[in-house]
Image: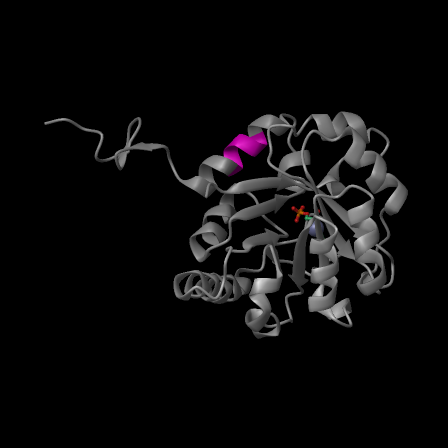
């Protein structure tokens, strides 16, 4: 599967959201960070705004809930029009029950892990999830530095997903998303480790040309275009003798 890019509107202009949502229409998903000032020390937006975003966005809405009591709130975001709802493992009383509620509402069910939470928290329950989000910064704010020490966690989840698909215990391969400090200089390391959905806030909205920033991430994440394994233009291997 090609790598998917999910711009985070946390770095958009909140007074011009519709304009800034339209500016990233070349991406695959629209990442919306919901924060409650309790689970994380920041406050963003909630249900009524997610509902309007889902109405105006041409991209599926990928909600990232950094809130307490997702057992209660996660299904409400599905009802508000999100295509995917990610809740934090650390905040959940019953992660599997939340995921089943979300799937029953017809949306993708996704679980997020803070940097301090080990992959083993969810590895035995992978069949319950459509995506696992590996946080590559402490959740709460955009513009933080990527944590390379999260790469082994991505690799461990990728190995478990591939094993489960191979032995038939997983009917579908959950996507592996990364969020925090993703930019052209870090994208290749996370996709090499096995991530296939890249969230990027400041790397997209900090650029004057958002479409070009998305294209740059895509190029680094997928590697250069090749034809039968040969680079389409330039580079070693493109020479004829
Ligand atoms: C942080 C949020 C991220 C944030 C990423 O807690 O979950 O989605 O927007 O911002 P960057 O890409 O700037 O690190
Ligand atoms: Zn996020």
User: Residue at point 59% right, 53% down?
Assistant: 178
Among the 4 quarters of the image, the one containing residue 16: top right
Where's residue 108, x and y in %?
66, 50
Q: Is residue 13 visible?
A: no
In the displayed structure image, the side of residue 59 where residue 69 appears, left or right: right
User: Residue at point 75% right, 51% down?
Assistant: 105
Where's residue 146, x and y in %?
59, 55
In the displayed structure image, the side of residue 43 where residue 7 appears, left or right: left
Where's residue 90, x and y in %?
73, 69
Pick the residue in front: 232 or 50. 50
* Magenta segment, prevailing SS (helix, strand or loop): helix
The residue most toward the right is 48
**Residue 120 against residue 239 in the figure, above or below:** below
In the displayed structure image, the side of residue 8 where residue 194 appears, left or right: left
Among the 4 quarters of the image, the one containing residue 129: bottom right
Where's residue 195, x and y in %?
51, 53
**Residue 16 against residue 220 in the figure, above or below:** above
Q: Write the start and end of the magenta stretch as one range.
A: 213-217
């Amino acid at each position: 599967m090609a790598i998917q890019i999910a711009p985070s509107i946390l770095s958009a202009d909140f007074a011009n959201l519709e304009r800034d949502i339209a500016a990233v229409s070349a991406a695959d998903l629209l990442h919306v960070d919901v924060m409650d000032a309790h689970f994380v020390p920041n406050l963003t937006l909630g249900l009524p705004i997610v509902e309007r975003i889902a109405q105006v966005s041409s991209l599926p809405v990928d909600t990232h809930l950094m809130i307490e009591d997702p057992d209660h709130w996660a299904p409400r975001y599905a009802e508000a029009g999100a295509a995917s709802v990610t809740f934090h493992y650390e905040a959940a009383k019953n992660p599997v029950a939340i995921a089943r509620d979300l799937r029953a509402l017809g949306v993708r069910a996704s679980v997020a892990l803070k940097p301090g939470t080990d992959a083993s928290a969810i590895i035995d329950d992978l069949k319950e999830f459509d995506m696992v989000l590996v946080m590559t910064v402490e959740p709460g704010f955009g513009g933080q530095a990527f944590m390379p020490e999260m790469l082994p966690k991505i690799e461990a989840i990728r190995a478990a997903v591939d094993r489960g698909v191979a032995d038939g215990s997983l009917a579908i391969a959950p996507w592996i998303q990364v969020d925090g400090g993703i930019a052209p200089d870090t994208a290749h390391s996370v996709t090499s480790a096995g991530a296939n959905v890249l969230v990027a806030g400041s790397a997209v909205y900090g650029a004057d040309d958002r479409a070009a920033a998305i294209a740059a991430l895509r190029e680094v994440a997928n590697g250069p275009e090749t034809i039968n394994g040969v680079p389409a233009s330039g580079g070693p291997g493109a020479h004829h003798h």
